[in-house]
Amino acid sequence: MSVCIFIMPDKAAALAAIAERLKGLTWIIDSGMAVEIYTNGKRVANDIDIVVLEKDIEEAARRLGTTITRRSADKSGLKIIDEKYACATIEGVEIELVCGSGRYMINGRERGFNITENHFACAKRVSYLGAELNVAAPEELLVHKTILGREKDVKDVGLLLESFTPDKNLLELFLSVYQLDEEERKAVLSKILE
């Protein structure tokens, strides 16, 4: 008789390990995990996305026990290209690490983005599952997820808007990161504020 043992990922331990290992570097938790944090678990993330300054990505990868590579992936119908990317597993939780620039293929058009110091300066320090974390500003998440527009992103935007009222000036600041024309920028802003 064989016995199968399944070990549950320990998100709390993974978050605590990330906070400890990345101490002294500039980093933020982004994407689905950030939405989970801001909605207090209404949205459950499957992984933890971390963004670091480009100057810190090699050191961050080393501290997380991995190395940098290039990623070209299709995630839920969205083509993502990251020139500097790393993936690790901590306490059974997948960790994705990127620096602040990359490209998306949205509606057949390639779009670049370049995360600036503003993303890190506007990040919130939040306690979640016992760890003190740097989390992307809610306005950055709203802009990012509205631009991506996948079904799960639309749900995330709705959950975030239930939790807080966005600052229009910050929305406009974060919109400037993406290579959008004026009409597209207005459309994204309108979707968030309507």
Image (cartoon, rainbow, N blue to C red):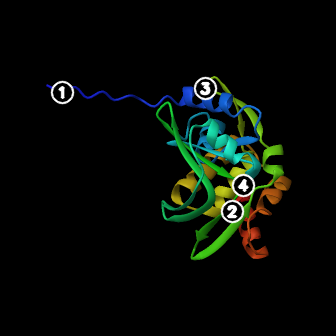
Amino acid at circle 2:
Lys
Looking at the rendered structure, the kind of residue marked 1 is Ser
Judge by depth and name the residue closer to the eye, 22 or 128: 22
- Identify the disc placed on residue 2: 1
Q: Which residue is mark 2?
A: 191
**What amino acid is labelled 4 in the image?**
Gly
Q: Mark 3 or 4, which is nearer the eye?
A: 4
Label placed on residue 129? 3
The mark that comes first in sequence, 2 or 1, is 1
Residue type at tag 3: Leu
Residue 144 visible in image: yes
Dot 4 or dot 2: first in sequence order is 4
What quarter of the picture does the C terminus occupy? Answer: bottom right
Relative to 49, 134 lies left or right: right
User: Which is more N-terminal, label 4 or label 3?
Assistant: 4
Marks 4 and 1 close (CB-CB < 8 Å): no
Q: Image height check: is 51 above or below 143?
A: above
Instruction: Point out which mark residue 132 bears.
Output: none
Residue depth check, mark 3 versus mark 1: number of the one nearer the observer: 1
